[in-house]
Amino acid sequence: MATSPPLAQDRVPVQGLCPRCGSAALAAYPVFSEGGWFDVVKCQGCLHSVSRERGPLLGALRLLADQI
């Protein structure tokens, strides 16, 4: 039985410390939740959200009209 490779999102390392656990392993990446797309910075140790801002309406898909 063939399986597809798992999906993975590139994560950009971010300087700083997690306010919950003190880890220096912070990363920025887009996430999709019940409210739509968000650009987040999360601790990779405890998954605490350090910041969460509204992202592009269609996530990684950029419309030509948005670039004008």
Image: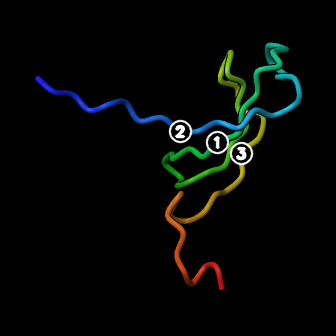
Mark 3 vs mark 2, CA separation in Å: 16 Å
Q: Looking at the image, how many numbered discs can be counted on the residues?
A: 3
Q: Nearer the viewer, residue 6 or 26?
A: 6
Is 34 left, or right, of 39 in this rendering? left
Task: Say which residue appears at 71% left-offset and 38% top-offset.
Answer: 12
1 or 3: mark nearer the eye: 1
Q: Which residue is mark 3?
A: 52
Horizontal and vertical percent position of residue 31: 56, 44
Whole-number angstrom distance, CA of label 1 to CA of label 2: 7 Å
Which secondary structure lies at badge 3? strand
Residue underneath mark 1: 29
Q: Secondary structure at mark 1?
A: strand
Camera-side residue: 44 or 7?
7
Q: Left of 25 or right of it: where is 34?
A: left
Q: Position of residue 4 (x, y in %)?
A: 26, 32
Task: Classify residue 57 by image quadrant.
Answer: bottom right
Amino acid type of the residue tagged 3 in the rendering = Arg
Query: Looking at the image, is mark 1 or mark 2 earlier in the sequence?
Result: 2
Type of amino acid under label 2: Gln
What is the number of the mark on residue 9?
2
Residue lying furthest right: 16
Residue type (three-letter) at the residue carrying disc 1: Tyr
